[in-house]
Image (spheres, helix red, strand yellow):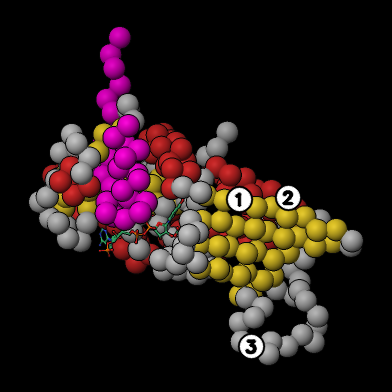
Amino acid sequence: MTEKEPIRVVVAGPRGRMGSETIRMIAQSSNLTLVAAVDHGHDGERIEDLLGINGLSARIYADIDACFSQEQPDVLIDFTHPEVGKRNLQKAIDYGVRPVIGTSGFSNEEVENYRNQMDEKKLGGIIAPNFAIGAVLVMKFSQMAAKYFPDAEIIELHHDKKKDAPSGTAIKTAELMTKTRQSKKQGAPDEKETLAGARGADFDGMRIHSVRLPGLIAHQEVLFGGKGELLTLRHDSMDRTSFMTGVHYATNTVMNLDTLVYGLENILD
Ligand SMILES: NC(=O)C1=CN([C@@H]2O[C@H](COP(=O)(O)OP(=O)(O)OC[C@H]3O[C@@H](n4cnc5c(N)ncnc54)[C@H](OP(=O)(O)O)[C@@H]3O)[C@@H](O)[C@H]2O)C=CC1
Ligand SMILES: O=C(O)C1=N[C@H](C(=O)O)C[C@H](O)C1
């Protein structure tokens, strides 16, 4: 019996909170192999020297074109910054590398554009605003609940190094809720903010609030109010390992896809 070749993975953002956790996950995986990393500095260095993980001799490239043409990876995993993630995804499509994108900041129009390009090439990939299984379940449960409770508010809470607000997860949750929630402007019709921003961001009349504090990792609460009752859905990522089951699963799954999927919920059984 022949052993299956491991999936050849490149990670963009290897020094980051998520990129470094992803590299630790790959190092422990029996069917993934890290062939290189893409960083905007540290060109030519080795991952083991950069992260202190013994035995990971994968090279770091500052130039993604050089990385893809020399290493010929199967999959790119990207945890960088919104603008960088978009550039890297486009490069992955150009080189026929399957993208697994965790970086936030993609609009529906952008996803559609990348999907059209990938459909033409029959290239599999995923953009997932959140790879934690519990967070994905909160999104799905919120979609169910919004049908019965159109009055809802999302509170997302993150560490104070996070660059974007609201979180990609909160936006995706709100988008899923619009599939079942009757559109309405919430709160008193004549409500007035005496301090700008007090009522949070407006998404189809529903409010999203972003909390940023040291000590937090990634958390989300969705509150649904009805006559005499309140339903609260909450998920907490206590540690970035919470995202790794989803990243590993997505990396395996994109090998058998021929389109771009938006959201981990679309590939879970
Ligand atoms: N989908 C999911 O489940 C999750 C998604 N995220 C998202 O992932 C992204 C990264 O988060 P996080 O790891 O916390 O952020 P970090 O800031 O810790 O990491 C981002 C890394 O990308 C590096 N970087 C910047 N430019 C480039 C470039 N051109 N090429 C390669 N690397 C580059 C940064 O380097 P430098 O600091 O030198 O600029 C940094 O090391 C965010 O968008 C976040 O919202 C986060 C957690 C879970
Ligand atoms: O920046 C983070 O940390 C996270 N970002 C993602 C998002 O914007 O939703 C996923 C998770 O919430 C952690």
Judging by the rendered image, the residue that carries numbered circle 3 is 195
Label 1 CA crowd tier, 10 Å (few <14, some 14–19, many 20+): some
Residue at the spot x=43%, y=48% of the render?
240
The amino acid type, in three-letter code, at marker 2 is Met
Name, please, the residue furthest toward the left: 44
Compared to residue 257, the image places residue 216 above or below, namely below
Q: Looking at the image, is mark 1 or mark 3 earlier in the sequence?
A: 3
| Quadrant that contains the C terminus | top right
Q: Looking at the image, is mark 3 or mark 2 earlier in the sequence?
A: 2
x then y, percent, for residue 65 = 18, 54
Observer-nearest residue: 16 or 207? 16
The amino acid type, in three-letter code, at marker 3 is Leu
Whether label 1 touches label 3, CB < 8 Å: no
Observer-nearest residue: 7 or 256? 7
**Structural distance between the alpha carbons of marks 3 and 2:** 33 Å
Residue at the spot x=32%, y=32% of the render?
28
> CB of residue at label 3: within 8 Å of ligand 2?
no
Judging by the rendered image, the residue that carries numbered circle 2 is 144
**Structural distance between the alpha carbons of marks 2 and 1:** 16 Å
Please tell me whether mark 2 sits on a helix, a strand or a loop. Answer: helix
Judging by the rendered image, the residue that carries numbered circle 1 is 235
Name, please, the residue furthest toward the bottom: 194
The amino acid type, in three-letter code, at marker 1 is His
Magenta part of the chain: 1-28
Residue 161 forms part of the magenta stretch: no
